[in-house]
Amino acid sequence: MVTNIILVGVGGQGSVLAGQIIARAAVLAGVAVATSEVHGMAQRGGSVFSTVRYGKDVLSPTVPEGAADVLLAFEKLEALRYLNYLKADGLALVNDQRIVPSVESLKLAPYPDDKTIEETLRRRAREVLIVPALEIAQQLGNPALTNTVMLGALSHFLDLPKDRWLQAITELVPPKTVELNLLAFDEGLKWAKRCARAPL
Amino acid sequence: MSAQAILMSGNEAIARGAWEAGVRVGCGYPGTPSTEILEALARYPEVDCEWSTNEKVALEVAVGAAIAGGRAIATMKHVGLNVAADPFFSVAYMGVNAGLVVVSADDPGMHSSQNEQDNRLLARAARVPLLEPSTAQECKEFALAAFEISERYDTPVLLRTTTRISHGKGLVTLGERRDVPRKPYRKNVQKNVVLPAHGRVRHQIIETQRIPALEKEAERWAQIFAGSDDLAIITSGAAFLYAREAFPNATILKLGMTHPLPRELIKRFCEGKKRIVVLEELEPYLTEHVRALGISIEEIPLPRFGELSVGLVRQAVERARDGATPPPVELPLLPPRPPILCAGCMHRGIFYVLKQLDAIVSGDIGCYTLGALAPLDAMDTCMNMGASLSMAHGMAKIFSEEEKKRLVAVIGDSTFYHSGVPALIDILYNGGQTVTIILDNHTTAMTGHQEHPGTGRTIKGEPAQIIELESLAKGLGIKNVQRVDPYDLLTAWRVVDMALHRKEPSVIIADAPCVLKEKRRFGEIVSVDHTKCTECFACTELGCPAIEVRDGHIEINKLLCIACTHCQQVCADCNAGIDIPQVLELVHQKRYADAFKVLMRANPFPAVAGRVCPHPCDHEVNALGWPQEKLYAERYPDLVKEFGTPGHPAKLSVRDVERFLGDYGIENFSGAEFAPREERPERVAIIGAGPAGLSAAFYLRRRGFRVTVFEAFEKPGGMMRYGIPAFRLNKEILDREIDRLLMMGVEIRCNVTVGRDVSFAELQREYDAVVIAVGDSAPQELELEGTSDVQEGLLYGVEFLRRVNRGQSVRVGRRVAVIGGGNTAIDCARSAKRLGAEVTVYYRRTAQEMPAIRDEIDEAILEGVHFEFQTNPIRVLAHGGRVCGLELIRMEPGPLDRDGRRRPIPIPDSEFSIDVDTVILAIGERADLEFLRETKVQFAEKIRTTFTGVTSQSAVFACGDVAFGYGTVTQSIATGRRVAGAVAAYLQRKNTAKQGTK
């Protein structure tokens, strides 16, 4: 069994680190992992996409269209853009944040409203959870914790033990922010337990 | 699983493999997706690593080290190997002493590259053995083994990865570093001096001994995954991963060494197989070689471009959309999110200046290539590392003098060291005059901030000699070498402009550190003063991600803004969005024709606007907080003297400058100068020949579209003709400016009312796009008692002005009451005054709240018009059908309404009556949109649009007051220009879509 996760967002949001944390947690849990990410030009405020796959038969680091178990989106428009990577009964975990693209881009098409986004996501996903991760992070005093809140919510749906998550976070976030990140993870997990139906 | 297994990227694993192989020297030049190999290798203290100036140098350094007896590795991206191709081909003949490995990281899909060349072909061309790992673990193993192969067969080895392999992460089992002693150095002229006589012998040895031996070696690197005989797959590299995952039951031959190929093994593998397919990314390299062995392989429809995926592979082999992939959900049209220069990036300043100067820009490779994208749109060419200078030099050999005066080469600091230097020498030596701008942000930014010869640090973080750009250029003999601050737009403009007019080569160093690396913040975050912002969107021409449009208004994203001040310098509070700083500079230099052309980029009616614009540009401090008035006075005392503001002699009147240039343009430009350079086939209909419609017509025609304007009245001009009275605007000036549009080839059909003479549906059928610009021409009606019986003495403002402007006879009584506080009200009052009446304007709010143009109110007062504020009419008094009086009531500010103003409410028992014989109602205008009833265009009081004028109906657009309601000529002109951009983008996209389906 392989679990396929795609992480999407906007360059600079920190999705690469988030992917590393998931991968590290999986390694600590003793499963094989493959990840892929894009560097260079694509990072400059552009749409970014990375993948984490773990499980016994993992080989290719990329997730084909229609095969992701989880779409972990740090931004709403990007969630929509990569929706078709999600499998038909997959889970969409979406940070409740809109990052308006450039004025030039908005000349080509408007940013869809929340209703359109949610309705479109629901046409594909078994479950769509709009996580108030940015808000929770701000309550904790630092919007940079958003991704960790999202990981906390994600952990509710995955079969990786919580202590491995905590260890991975401890190893990979800047040392001064470990405590806060662990707290953010817990908040995310609590939110998911409250609002979600069931683990995958 | 071994405790030693850790998660590593392919690149890190290659570095690890090289380290375990006892490598002593590592060289490279940064390039995605290869960069992290050398970065990881440099962290091992035993390895002497360097960022070389370019890939050729890197490989030569590595060859030297290997010949001298130490194992060496050179790393680069695929196109880097082109730069290093010369030593690569030659060292293949020479052979090595200690092991030499070259890593090429290819980029199928072009995530961050200018092409997707397949470097397997280069290995074959150079007669070099080629290894292709598929996983991070293999990256380590293959790198380690590559050194052994190199030494055993006396050859360099090419290790080729692709983006997915380099940047994919997997578990890697670690080993120890081997103790590989240095090989003794021996002089060997026959091998190491590539004289023709030596080369002939070496080539023979390669073909007769090395390649056959390697072919045997290649068998050791092949793996067979046994499976069903129904499908046999031959593959390598990343394609193996996709193949294995898509077809877990197939029999797979995975090749690790793909040059030379293990031909015998392939033949044996294929024996008795029913169905054989080759799965490979990009070039049909394996396919052709396997076919050449006489093996019949199945033709499968794999693209020869882009990355493969499990889905693509499955689809190609199964010849149908694979059942495993669910059908895609149809998504709404989404705004794209391409990479973009960071907020506050220094490059933006230079590209903005180049756009101002309408420069022809020969660009180069780096973050700054993004300067080519809209809205900066300031790059003409970008080919390969270092080509900007040499290409510009070549262009100059052909270009006209006029074109040469616009020609600039733009190159980054690291790229300049890489390969710009020889090109600069070429320009100087061969008498070129090219202007070179070095964008010196003190780092190799795009690949992730690597050191280079200008940073003063090595890859290991040790101090290094700085190769100083200014002294380098001067040392070569360039006389005009200047350093500019890219955050000072005007100075940068002056320096570049001056260099363009010189008869010798110039080097301009735009010097400021990368804001992403330095995490700079310059000062107080910029904020928008919405009471001043004209919504001209001039600041958005910078393409800064911190400048956002929310609900049609400009906002600054406080998380992104670093207060670089670019936008503050661009802002000029111009209603039309004119580049006022550049216009003033050009007028100051007495370059009136140039200044006029800059004006026309934003406003095709400068002579009109120079007379009627409410000139918000005279704000002391602009909407983004820049002290513009003070700066104008400091920079241009000459202009202040010539174009001072009456009553404020020290204050520059920008509007007077505009009027001067507008009149200059009428005298010196017929309009033919603005005719399109190329005709386009698409036809656009514009409804309404007011300022917005004609502005849209001008900018669409300028782009080459065939434009027809439909006007209901007998002459074009809209409010400019029928709203503004002659004492404010001489209609001859308007005619002259409209003539320019006719000269350009805009067709204007007057006396045609859409919805009566021609249906809207017909326009939609006949034209590729329709722009609605009908304005607000119908009067807003006021609920007023006593009006039903009135036959004489009650007039509506717009109708009254229209009659006056048409020269029709209009009679007003001796005493006239004008109701309203906008421009129409003031124009009515002043017109009525000129007809000999005693005029009073009644307005329900306070004097300060009056929306009319300040100057016009002042003029009206001077002319003797009376004003009564906070007064509202309630009843018209008539006698025998003729107005004889008006009953009014006093008002006071009430509760706040939606737009934050206090709504006036009547003061009880404050009614009073006056004697008047004419009442002019000028409380506002509205659009008559009956003709849209049957369409999908959504509207309420206004047509609903995006900020660029896109409506809810495809191919239908709207601009001016009917959509935006700004209510001034100049702001309507700005919306017309914006809608022209939206129409052009729409037609462009439609065209591209059409080509795609062909």
Image (cartoon, grey):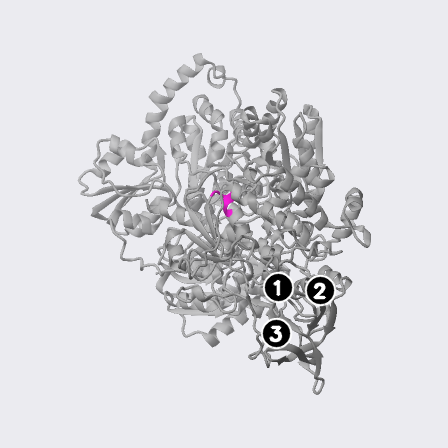
Image x and y of residue A21, in percent:
51, 59
Image: magenta residue range: B700-704
For image coordinates 38% across by 56% down, the residue present is B762
* Pointer 3 local density, CA inside 10 Å: few below 14, some 14–19, many at least 20: few
* Magenta segment, prevailing SS (helix, strand or loop): helix
Question: Are labels 3 and 1 on one chain?
Answer: yes
Which three-letter amino acid code belongs to the residue tagged 2? Gly
Q: Is residue B514 magenta?
A: no
Among the 4 quarters of the image, the one containing residue A88: bottom left
Quadrant position of the C terminus of chain A in the picture: bottom left
Among the 4 quarters of the image, the one containing residue B466: top right
Q: Answer above or below: position of B974 versus B592.
A: below
Q: Residue furthest bottom?
A: B909
Q: Residue under label 3, please give it.
A: B898
Q: CA distance from mark 3 to mark 1?
A: 39 Å
Q: In this orientation, which residue lies closer to the viewer: B214 or B658?
A: B658
- Would residue A27 be seen by someone viewing this image from the given angle? no
Q: Residue under label 1, please give it.
A: B810
Quadrant position of the N terminus of chain A in the picture: bottom left
Q: Is residue B701 magenta?
A: yes
